[in-house]
Image (cartoon, rainbow, N blue to C red):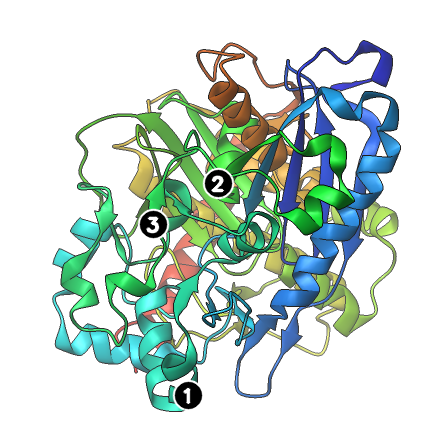
């Protein structure tokens, strides 16, 4: 692991604040983007789910988690706290919170997994040209994006639209509270479905069809945009950070690519955390957004293109809890003893619906082939393989975007915790999988952009990411999985395709 002791850390130092769906972490990095051992703080929490498909977090509770993390870290690094020159925030894409004229949240934080706007997405699909919308925004008419959420709010909770003076991501809300001012980074705005990837401005065409206008969205900026100093309340709380530079909140998917060293078309990031994604990031001025893929931005010069799965580590966790499976270390041993696709099952792993590559809002999970002899362990193995099969479909779409021999780098807590799953990925994709050794890739990526904004580094490849074990595909197993991929395709066509509602 690329950790260093505090005595080895080189100034200037950077604090990375990573706000995720299950925890918030504040982590100290040095000027070479190395994580400082034991210099971190975290707070865990749970998503709030509603019976009708809502998935939320409370904005102020999430804000307090960030405050607690920064409090703890400020104390831990007391002897070197004045060497911190920047705080870089990364957080989940596709979030939405409404705030009143006093800057206080009046809504929960609506997350990408909230499916209550699926009918609104279907309405957009019927009324608008989705292909043209995708060409401009890199997004689809899907419940995870903001256009559908605004239309759902208009129908179900119009009082929020009446009361909110501004709509923003949680990262913007965080900075509005800390600094008394916020802006939306290009990175964060690019994944809303309200942003034109080519002009790098809010997309006026889609806004004309929504119950919000540009005046209620944040000002746009980039990672190097100047932000004000801490507001008085927090300046008193952390007095030695009074002149620290705050970096506008960045999308954690983009920073994960940067932090794991996947910054050209020669590298492909494969991430499985709560959700999953396969992404390529590169610097370009002109590009075409391929059907089936999304396209966002890391900054004004770099696009991020790929596909996303709503069901990654959250599927693994659900199976463990539902079937009361053994601890993770025992599961690894048991799963490793099983032969590929030996369970007789075909799975559509859509507990939270489907995103890439079909963007089927209405999709639900399915397990076909169950018998009296089927065991919970077989179902678990079949689901892990099914997730890998979904990534194989995304890989097909990315072939014309990435280099033929592009290296695939594995990241994300769920995938990094299981060598068996990494080997399944290698066998299903038919490509070597290189395990990242950057435990906090998203935080490291945010740190790299902070160092770039400070002028400490001039390019993101100056500080290479650490990698570890390589998982080589087995030709025989890859052949077996090709048949499994085709079975999954056929099952999708039979029970899900062309039934959008």
Mark 1 or mark 3: name the one nearer the start of the chain. Answer: 1
Mark drawn on residue 159: 1
| Position above or below: 486 against 48 | above
Check residue 219 in the rendering and tell me which mark sits there, or answer none: 3
The residue wearing badge 2 is 248
Q: Residues within 10 Å of mark 1 (few under 14, many from 20)?
A: few
Q: Earlier in the sequence, mark 3 or mark 2?
A: 3
* Disc 2 secondary structure class: strand
Res. 197 image quadrant: top left
* Element type at mark 1: helix
- Pinpoint residue 339: horizontal percent, then vertical percent: 67, 47
Closer-to-camera residue (227/40): 227
Query: Where is 163 relative to 133, above or below?
Result: below
Q: Where's residue 229, x and y in %?
A: 57, 38
Q: 128 or 272, which is in the foreground?
A: 128
Measured from the top left, where is residue 241 in percent x and y? 70, 32
Identify the residue at image location x=38%, y=56%: 356
């Amino acid at each position: 692991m690329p950790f260093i002791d505090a005595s080895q850390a080189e100034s200037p130092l950077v604090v990375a604040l990573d706000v995720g769906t299950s925890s918030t972490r504040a982590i100290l990095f040095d000027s070479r983007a190395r994580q400082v051992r034991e210099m971190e703080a975290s707070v865990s929490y749970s998503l709030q789910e509603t019976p009708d498909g809502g998935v939320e977090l409370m904005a102020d509770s999430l804000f307090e988690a960030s405050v607690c993390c920064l409090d703890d870290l400020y104390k831990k690094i007391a002897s070197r706290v004045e060497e911190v020159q920047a705080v870089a925030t990364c957080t989940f894409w596709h979030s939405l919170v409404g705030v009143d004229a006093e800057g206080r949240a009046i809504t929960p934080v609506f997350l990408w997994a909230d499916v209550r706007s699926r009918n609104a997405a279907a309405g957009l699909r019927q009324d608008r040209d989705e292909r043209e919308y995708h060409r401009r925004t890199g997004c689809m008419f899907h419940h995870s994006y903001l256009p559908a959420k605004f239309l759902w709010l208009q129908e179900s909770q119009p009082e929020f639209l009446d009361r909110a003076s501004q709509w923003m991501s949680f990262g913007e809300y965080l900075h509005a509270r800390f600094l008394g001012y916020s802006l939306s980074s290009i990175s964060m705005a690019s994944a809303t479905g309200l942003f034109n990837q080519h002009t790098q401005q809010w997309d006026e065409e889609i806004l004309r069809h929504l119950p919000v206008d540009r005046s209620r969205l944040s000002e746009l900026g980039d990672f190097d945009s100047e932000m004000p100093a801490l507001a008085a309340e927090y300046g008193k709380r952390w007095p030695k950070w009074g002149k620290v530079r705050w970096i506008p909140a960045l999308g954690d998917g983009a920073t994960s690519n940067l932090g794991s060293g996947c910054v050209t078309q020669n590298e492909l990031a494969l991430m499985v955390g709560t959700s999953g994604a396969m992404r390529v990031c590169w610097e370009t001025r002109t590009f075409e957004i391929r059907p089936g893929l999304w396209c966002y931005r890391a900054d004004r010069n770099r696009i991020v293109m790929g596909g996303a799965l709503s069901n990654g580590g959250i599927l693994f966790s659900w199976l463990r809890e539902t079937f009361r499976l053994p601890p993770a270390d025992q599961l690894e041993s048991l799963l490793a003893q099983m032969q590929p696709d030996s369970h007789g099952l075909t799975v559509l792993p859509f507990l939270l619906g489907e995103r890439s590559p079909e963007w089927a809002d209405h999709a639900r999970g399915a397990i076909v082939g169950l018998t009296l002899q089927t065991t919970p362990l077989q179902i678990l193995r079949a689901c892990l393989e099914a997730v890998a099969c979904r990534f194989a479909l995304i890989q097909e779409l990315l072939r014309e975007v990435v280099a033929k021999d592009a290296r695939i780098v594995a990241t994300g807590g769920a995938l990094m915790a299981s060598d068996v799953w990494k080997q399944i990925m290698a066998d299903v994709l038919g490509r070597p999988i290189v395990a990242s050794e950057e435990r906090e890739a998203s935080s490291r990526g945010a740190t790299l952009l902070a160092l770039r904004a400070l002028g400490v580094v001039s390019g993101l490849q100056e500080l290479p990411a650490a990698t570890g074990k390589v998982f080589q595909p087995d030709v025989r197993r890859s052949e077996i999985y090709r048949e499994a991929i085709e079975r999954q395709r056929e099952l999708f066509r039979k029970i899900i395709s062309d039934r959008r509602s």
